[in-house]
Image (cartoon, rainbow, N blue to C red):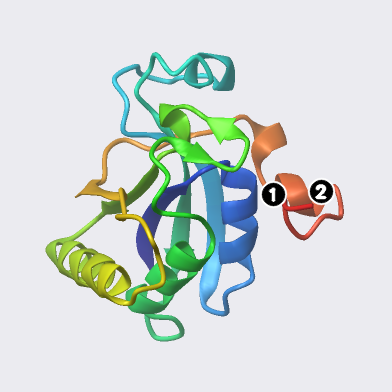
Amino acid sequence: METATFAAGCFWGVEAAFRRVKGVSATAVGYTGGTVENPAYENVCTGRTGHAEAVEVQFDPQQVTYAQLLDVFWSSHNPTTLNRQGPDVGTQYRSAIYYHSPQQQTEAIASKEASEKSGKHAKPIVTEITSAATFYRAEEYHQQYLEKRGQASCHL
């Protein structure tokens, strides 16, 4: 198993997108990229901890490639809006790829460049690509939030 970590706005919908991928064995929503140890949701929502809402994905590379997970990442949010996804605004909703190995870093950069060149986006992509930092698992009520409520996505 390998680990991948992505931030793409509110973590509920992003987690749901990755949970549908064959080869993903587990997901967890949480916080990463900040300066405060063991942040709570209420702290992260202030925008003062520096954390992003993120999804940690455990996957079997024999069943799904990191490149395929990157495709899910790009299709699950708007990577051109800085610190915002839909009605959610703040640095905690930034677009970011947190790589766990030099190979993931290389693939993430190449994927971002390909997405930029695709012409799909009218604005520049603002997605950060940075080394994975400590991932703090969010409170249990956030885990598989949409599934627990019988919802497929956050979108209306």
Q: Nearer the viewer, residue 122 or 148?
A: 122
Q: Residue furthest bottom?
A: 62
Give the left or right position of residue 113, taking residue 69 as reference. Answer: left
Percent coordinates x, y for residue 31 in the rendering: 44, 33
Q: Toward the viewer: 74 or 49? A: 74
Query: Residue 76 placed where, x, y %?
Result: 54, 61
The residue drawn where x is 69% and y is 49% is 144
Label 1 crowd bin: few (<14), some (14–19), many (20+), radius 10 Å: some
Give x and y (percent) for residue 59.
45, 69
Label 2, on which residue?
148
Please tell me which residue is depicted at 48% across the width and 21% down the height of the picture.
44
Residue type beneath disc 2: Lys
| Contact between labelled residues 2 and 1, with CB atoms less than 8 Å apart | yes
Q: Secondary structure at mark 2?
A: helix
Residue 3 horizontal/vertical position (percent) = 36, 60
Q: Write down the residue under mark 1.
A: 144
